[in-house]
Image (cartoon, rainbow, N blue to C red):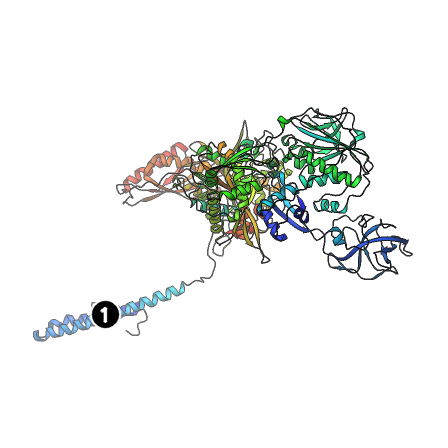
Amino acid sequence: MKNAIDNKVLEDIRVAYLGKKGTITSQLKLLGTLPANERKEAGIEINKAKGKLQQKIQEKRQILQAQELEKKLQLESIDITMPGRKNHGANIHPVTRTMQRIVTLFAGLGFEEKMGPEIEDDYHNFEALNFPSHHPARTMHDTFWFDDGHLLRTHTSPVQIRAMKNMNPPIKIIAPGRVYRSDSDQTHTPMFHQVEGLVVGESVTFASLKGVLNQFVNAFFEKDLKIRLRPSYFPFTEPSAEVDVEWKKEDGTTGWLEVLGCGMVHPNVLKSGGIDPEKYTGFAFGLGVERFAMLRYGVKDLRQFFENDITFLKQFK
Amino acid sequence: MKISEKWLREWVNPSVSSDELVEQLTMLGLEVDDVLPAAGEFTEVVVAKIVALEKHPDADKLNVCQVDIGCEENLQIVCGAPNARVGLVAPLAKIGAVLPGNFKIKKSKLRGMESFGMLCSNVELGLSDDHSGLLELPNNAPIGKDIREYFQLDDNIIDIDLTPNRADCFSLKGIAIDVACLNDLKIKSVEPKEVEISHNEHIEVKLSADKQCPRYLCRVINNIDNTKETPIWMQEKLRRSGIRSIHPVVDVTNYVMLEFGQPMHGFDKTTIKGAINVKMAKKDDKITLLDGKEITLNDSFLMIADEINYLAIAGIMGGENSGVTESTKNIVLESAYFDPATIMGKSRDIGVHTESALRFERGVDSQLQTQAMHRATELIIDICGGEVGPINEAKEEKYLPKQKNITLSKEKLKRVLGFEVPSQQVTDILTGLSMQVETQENTWQIKAPSSRFDIAIEEDLIEEVVRMVGYDKMPSENLVGQSVIIQLPEEHISHNNIKNQLCNLGYLEAINYSFVSEKLLNEFNMQEDSFALKNPLTEEFSIMRTSLLPGMMQTLNYNLRRQHDSIKMFETGNVFHKKTRVTEDDKIIAICTGIRNTEHWGMEKEKLDFFDCKGDLEKLLDSSKMNYDFTLSEYDFLHPGRQAQVCLKGELVGWIGQVHPEICRRMGIKKEVYAFELFMKKIQNSSLPSYETISKYPSVRRDLAMVIDAEVSYQNIANLIYNELGENLVDTIVFDEYKGDSIGKDKRSLAVGLVLQQKNATFEDKDVDKLIAKVVSSISEKLSIEIRGN
């Protein structure tokens, strides 16, 4: 049995001993010929041998099966370093990624996402936001116009007006979207993205605006960055501020980088939105998404965002 | 607004460094864009006078000058400047001098003649980019004096980017008030000396447009000598504010404008016929301005006229014919208040941008005119001499801006800011900003200065207070108030979800511009209901896109040309149409070309086709759990035999197809390109998962094989199958299609597997047989198709 190399040899052995005409089977058959007093003992002995043999065969069978399996598996071996089958890999655009991140962070603070139209009227884009006609502040917005007096929104701020008209305080909204200005050079594209935030309620203060933006900047960049608010001017907020972030430049020096504009909602704007400025206060802020994406991911050239070069886009997995 | 730091410090001189002063300005909201030295770094440059000059014997363009620098011996200097002449006073860089750019002056020989230094132009000293010749200094400049000292060049030019609300800071005075208030100082204001009048000549003024010009002052000054040189100190201050010296009258008016913010104008008295009339222009009248530009007017232009001609466009620019030149002897000086709304936008309309227009359209202090007139008179007389006449003032009090009374309440201040500012500090700040302040128990009663057009309401005062407190000193607070859980409709499939699904299907997101060129749109025949921008940047971005396809095809092409062979991309964004009114619809496009999967050793390299694209679309639509119908469509930008419109309950959802090969060819794309475009909103509705008991009974599969004619679609067959089997049919698998001559031209054979299952019983073979038989007979009868079932 030691030399049994496969199941067949083993089976031959089994038949030779345990088969119908096998040695042990024959011995058992001869039991009846023995004297009665020997029969019992002999029976025990033969059955003992039979059991032992059966066990041996079983053991050997298992060994052989294992060997066989091993051989089979060995044959089935593959080079697991070969590349797997896969579909084309893909990801969202870095601007979308940044926008989603910003919206998600504010959603955590209870801000509801709102959208507005890209083709706006003068009322929503300017007038309701406290830009009087011909006001020099309008020249800060190089506007694309249509013949019928409509325009491409120059900022996401019109969403403030629409939201206030449709909601009751407390209001907390975050409005991402495309905006347009007729300006094109190394640092301007005629279309870009903004995220607008608006909070209106009973204890909405300038100090809380500073607190929220501080938290946001730190959460977005996952760094403890210094920010500073600096007086500025937007017709739709009073007081108004620009927000600068202390940023380490490539040459190792640090400087202030302007990243967003904000302020307390101007009472005229609250009124445009149908909200009583004597009862409620509000703050609003607006930021350029591309700016945040560039800082976060180290993109150097703004225009690359809209060239849609696959090699560029695939870097933002 | 560019100002000299030294000049600002004449008005207010806080004990802070230049860097700190600049930081203070920025933090006051007067954002400093740039700080530049008043001149380049240089040493050893002195005032010199050319006392003799000869032509260089060996060089046409060079002169050999003898130059006096106040030493015993004159220096020999070889110079090529065109304006070198005997008597000229100019800067000289001595041997050993170092000029900007670390340019060292050494003794040299030019074509054999020795030169002991270099006479300098503006450029060499880093003063300006005027390289027309040697910098000409006044004849009385002290010979030998160090130029840095003479010009007071150890100074900075501070360039402030003013926000449109701060009209008052277009002057030294305005900026100084802010700086003084912040540092708890008082400004050292310039108090003009009133020059005694020496005659009574005056020009009558009529305010025909008194609403637009409620105050107009003028004064005659006779017998001035305008050929006089403007003093260096004034020229230098002007230069540091970016204004070139012209002649004394212009220089003085500019100087007063920089000091107080009052733009002024000088007319040549002899050109004025009779009285001055301030009136609105008539449509189509014309005026030629000082810069030679002819302007066609309309009735919204406010004009300064005499009894015959227009003299100037009020507040913007004077006319060519009435302008003061160096030879003018008798002048009329104007100092006026024009209504900002009247001036606003005018300089943009006519493309004439002046310092004057900039100030008037944002608002000039209406109480400033007399003071400015006195100041300008004083300065002109000092430089040019002359005989001064009385000031003639015309005004319409009721149209002058009223001083605003504003109440600031302590409660509101705290409610807006979220922190307490000590009352005394508030009083000090408002007083420091030249406001009249009356402190009461819970309020401050404020009268705002006439220079501050931006202060009208309580919030404006709050900003002033917090600006002076310092935005950086303000505490950061958490946002408090009721928090509400935001609604999250589960039956709505979000944008992000759809984008992620497409990414998982291998599509990379692109963002294309919302405007395209007319040519591109026409290429796809998509110009119907399109509309153009009135003022596009370029033709390339002139029309609002009516579909996401053209832009996406450009992006595809851009990448195909950069060695990307297999491309799958998507975009979401608005498309725009104009029928009776403008509509914008949120759409989604996916586009693909190349091979099915990434090239792989274990797979056939197969071109992707319509059904890859359709499969992706079906997977995308799957989460909505709705039944979308695909029917052959007739879009002319798609392959006529490979396109479908996608509908849901009879409503158009979008299209899918192969982009027309002819369009691809014209764009230079050789591959087959497939795409689908859908209305975003129409694929965002789903339904809540609803639990159903899982059948415990086994399913049975039966296969059908049939040969069908070209005009029969799989959909026809599928509909019949469903009609017969209804709910018993749990899955349909089309597992083979064959086309070939053996089954006849225009025919194809289809093999379809049907999986049947019952909810509450095992399907008996004989029941399945009966059902399949019904399916077979239904199909063969209704579509006369040869069919086998087993």
Spot occupied by residue A144 in the image (x, y as percentages of width and height): 60, 36
What count of labels does the image hold? 1
Q: Residues within 10 Å of mark 1 (few under 14, many from 20)?
A: few
Position above or below: B63 against B197: below
Q: Residue furthest right?
A: B57
Q: Return the chain for callout 1.
A: A
Spot occupied by residue B88 in the image (x, y as percentages of width and height): 85, 50
User: Looking at the figure, which quarter contains the C terminus of chain B?
Assistant: top left
In this view of the protein, can residue B641 be seen by the observer?
Answer: no
Spot occupied by residue B259 in the image (x, y as percentages of width and height): 68, 41
In the foreground, A8 or B371:
B371
Position above or below: B3 against A62: above
Dividing the picture into quadrants, the one containing residue B557 is: top right
- Left or right, B226 with respect to B640, comes to right
In this view of the protein, can residue B75 be seen by the observer?
Answer: yes
In the foreground, A252 or A188:
A252
Dividing the picture into quadrants, the one containing residue B234 is: top right
User: Looking at the figure, which quarter contains the N terminus of chain B?
Assistant: top right
Spot occupied by residue B116 in the image (x, y as percentages of width and height): 84, 60
Position above or below: A127 against B151: above
Q: Which residue is mark 1?
A: A55
Q: Secondary structure at mark 1?
A: helix
Q: Residue at x 71, y 44 (%)?
A: B242
- Left or right, B362 with respect to A18, comes to right
Q: Residue at x 31, y 44 (%)?
A: B699
In the foreground, B585 or B196:
B196
Q: Amino acid at mark 1?
A: Gln
